[in-house]
Image (tube, coloured by chain):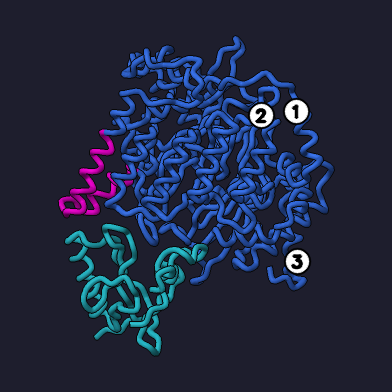
Chain colours: A cyan, B blue
């Protein structure tokens, strides 16, 4: 299987409320800790293909893969600061977004 | 001819803002119903995102990093107390209890749900507001001087012209799918507070030799990836010809503006590539050849609109309030507020108050719903129920009696709205940046907050004097960094946020684009760099000299040199 430079997860925005969602084992999750991680290009392509089908089903929008590193606890953390921001919410308003719900620091 | 009912015009009515008649109300109501249907079809899957996106954008609805964002138009920045209260109610009911006032005199909600947006738009329509054309490749919300109608240096209140243009451009079939967005700003004053030189079209109300009111027309200004100062295309266009002349400009742009590359599609690129003389010739040819009768100016319609902007019933007062003089001395904090945030009014005994939405360490342009209600109350108690939004992201109370200033200040102070920093170094313009915006390459708000905290001493700020810092979180330049005396642009460099600093920008009639100071710096370094720049300016300035004047006099190289030396001395800049 062709290797990836970094493992990847699939992010999207929920159609109805725009919140960031992550493709998990059983569908879209609001917590990144439950995101399914692609470790090679085939797995990443499968995630992307599922994401495109979900766009066609009008469940999510703005679907894309993001590079992550996987911690010892199995939780993926994006490498880029943009996606790190999306995991939490506005850095200037810790009372808003996922961070306010405690989801940003969740474990599976 | 007009579709409006002239009998509904209310000359000399106490209102100072435009009011919808049945024609306007029906137009907006129908648009809400249309969008409600589009949202329903989208949620049911009958419309794909590609099909739906243009509809939502034309109704001000974006998809951002964490949620949808709804941009509400505040035409030429004018709001009534009732409208401000409604904005607060919507923030509480459908959003997270606050709103963000933008550099285009709009308001943005950062957390609306798609399913709620038709209800939000309906709620806005009830108070004569909408989000139409706050996005998309169309003519956007027309902006104007936030001191319109009250500035002592004004030839004519530009809001009648701005409203006239809003009606002309709303749902204009020929200009709904332009090569790119198109922004118009209007000023009627001798000092430009509307940044007309950096708009696609800037209009300056002028008088000709015969004393007739007309417009100097500037075209091809803009910020973003490729900033340009606009160029005068005509020194004088009569009011009778204004719509036809703008139609001619738009047609030339629509025909010759590039559509092959979105980064080269604004009219500023057309003006730059063809040259102002060639564009002028094309516009004049179109203007001469077109059937102008279709766009013929209807003076009755203009007067109908202008009648809404008649001055409120001011009292006859002495030019200066003795009560105010005493209160300024007795309450130094209030005295500072008057010194910094209060501007002269054209009517004796009155004042213009700038309410800063830039508390020290706060988020520029944000107001809580509670603060919005306090502002609405303040405008009713002290200012005929009218408010303005400035492109500097502050709120203006345009008609306050000098003798009421102290009571107003106490009310504002109780709501954390009395920061005496209007125009000073902590009155920073900042876009939402990467904290909210999906286009951003770096955060801008935390940088603004750090600078604001560094200069938290207001007496130090007053010693520095007027100094505009403007921050954008990407090259699209919503934070107007190109025209900041000190501009800051957030970029990505090797996977990190990096900030490029420019000096010498100027948004007024003497407009100039800032020049880059040197390599980018980290967010943590920005306050140090700004402090070095300010200290050097203070050391070099002549008596009464503003930052931009010092910079122009001594030159950019001197500022670069001093920063380079500071870096060599270990400041790591």
Give the numbered dot on residue B321: 1
Q: In the rendered view, tell whether residue B442 sits above or below residue B344.
A: below
Task: Indicate whether B348 appears above or below B558.
Answer: above
Q: Which chain does the residue under circle 3 lie in?
A: B
Residue that badge 2 annotates: B401
Residue B511 visible in the picture: no
Same chain for the residues under marks 3 and 1 in the image: yes
- Closer to the chain start, of discs 3 and 1, is 1
Q: Quarter-wise, where is residue B212 in the image?
A: top right
- Image coords of residue B560 (percent x, y): 71, 58
State the residue at coordinates (36%, 18%).
B295
| Quarter of the view holding residue B235 | top right
**Real-space Cα separation, disc 2 to disc 3, in angstroms:** 48 Å
CA distance for labels 2 and 1 = 9 Å
Q: What element carries label 3?
A: helix
Task: Check the residue under mark 2 and report the chain it is in.
Answer: B
Could you tell me how far apart the alpha carbons at marks 3 and 1 are, in whole angstroms? 49 Å
Of tags 2 and 3, the one toward the viewer is 2
Q: Which residue is nearer to you in this view: B158 or B507?
A: B158
Which region shows up in magenta? B30-59
The foreground one among B348 and A81 is B348
Q: Where is residue B527 in the image (x, y as percent from the top left)?
A: 67, 62
Q: Predominant secondary structure in magenta?
A: helix
* Residue that label 3 marks: B566
Is B55 in the magenta?
Answer: yes
Image mark count: 3
């Amino acid at each position: 299987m062709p290797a990836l430079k970094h493992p990847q997860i699939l992010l999207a925005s929920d159609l109805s409320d725009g919140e960031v969602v992550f493709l998990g084992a059983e569908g879209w999750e609001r917590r990144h800790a439950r995101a399914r991680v692609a470790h090679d290009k085939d797995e990443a392509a499968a995630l992307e293909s599922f994401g495109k089908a979900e766009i066609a089903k009008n469940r999510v929008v703005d679907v894309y893969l993001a590079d992550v590193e996987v911690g010892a606890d199995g939780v993926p953390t994006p490498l880029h600061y943009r996606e790190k921001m999306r995991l939490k919410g506005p850095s200037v308003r810790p009372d808003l977004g996922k961070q306010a719900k405690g989801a940003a620091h969740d474990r599976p | 001819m007009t579709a409006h009912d002239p009998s509904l015009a209310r000359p000399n009515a106490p209102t100072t803002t435009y009011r919808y008649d049945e024609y306007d109300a029906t137009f907006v109501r129908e648009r809400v119903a249309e969008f409600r249907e589009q949202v329903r079809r989208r949620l049911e899957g009958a419309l794909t995102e590609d099909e739906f996106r243009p509809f939502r954008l034309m109704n001000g609805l974006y998809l951002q990093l964490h949620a949808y964002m709804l941009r509400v138009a505040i035409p030429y920045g004018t709001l009534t107390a009732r409208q401000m209260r409604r904005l607060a109610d919507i923030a509480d009911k459908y959003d997270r209890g606050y709103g963000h006032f933008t550099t285009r005199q709009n308001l943005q909600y950062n957390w609306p749900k798609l399913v709620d947006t038709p209800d939000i738009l309906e709620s806005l329509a009830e108070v004569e507001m909408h989000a139409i054309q706050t996005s998309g490749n169309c003519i956007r919300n027309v902006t104007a001087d936030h001191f319109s109608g009250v500035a002592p240096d004004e030839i004519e209140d530009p809001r009648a012209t701005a409203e006239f243009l809003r009606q002309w451009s709303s749902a204009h079939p020929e200009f709904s799918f332009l090569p790119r967005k198109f922004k118009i700003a209007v000023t009627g004053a001798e000092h430009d507070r509307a940044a007309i030189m950096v708009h696609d079209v800037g209009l300056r109300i002028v008088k000709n030799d015969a004393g007739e009111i007309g417009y100097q027309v500037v075209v091809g200004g803009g910020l973003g990836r490729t900033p340009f100062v606009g160029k005068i295309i005509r020194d004088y266009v009569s009011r009778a010809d204004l719509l036809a002349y703008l139609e001619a400009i738009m047609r030339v742009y629509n025909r010759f503006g590039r559509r092959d590359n979105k980064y080269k599609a604004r009219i500023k690129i057309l003006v730059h590539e063809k040259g102002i003389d060639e564009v002028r010739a094309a516009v004049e040819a179109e203007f001469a050849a077109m059937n102008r009768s279709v766009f013929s100016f209807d003076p009755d319609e203009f007067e109908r609109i202008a009648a809404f902007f008649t001055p409120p019933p001011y009292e006859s007062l002495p030019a200066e309030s003795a009560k105010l003089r005493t209160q300024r001395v007795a309450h130094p904090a209030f005295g500072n507020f008057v010194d910094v945030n209060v501007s002269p009014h054209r009517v004796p005994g009155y004042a213009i108050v700038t309410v800063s939405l830039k508390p020290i360490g706060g988020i520029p342009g944000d107001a809580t719903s509670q603060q919005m209600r306090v502002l609405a109350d303040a405008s009713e108690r002290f200012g005929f129920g009218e408010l303005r939004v400035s492109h500097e992201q502050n709120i203006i109370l345009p008609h306050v009696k000098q003798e009421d200033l102290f009571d107003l200040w106490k009310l504002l102070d109780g709501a954390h709205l009395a920061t005496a920093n209007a125009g000073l170094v902590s009155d920073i313009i900042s876009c939402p940046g990467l904290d909210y915006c999906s286009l951003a390459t770096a955060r801008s708000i935390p940088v603004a907050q750090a600078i604001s905290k560094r200069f938290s001493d207001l007496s130090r700020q007053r010693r520095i004097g007027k100094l505009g810092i403007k921050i954008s979180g990407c090259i699209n330049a919503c934070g107007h960094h190109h025209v900041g005396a000190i501009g800051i642009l957030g970029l990505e460099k090797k996977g990190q946020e990096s900030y490029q600093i420019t000096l010498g920008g100027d948004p007024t009639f003497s407009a100039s684009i800032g020049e880059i100071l040197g390599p980018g710096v980290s967010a943590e370094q920005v306050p140090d760099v700004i402090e070095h720049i300010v200290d050097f300016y203070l050391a070099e300035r002549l008596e009464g000299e503003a930052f931009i004047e010092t910079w122009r006099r001594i030159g950019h190289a001197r500022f670069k040199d001093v920063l380079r030396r500071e870096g060599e001395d270990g400041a790591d800049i």
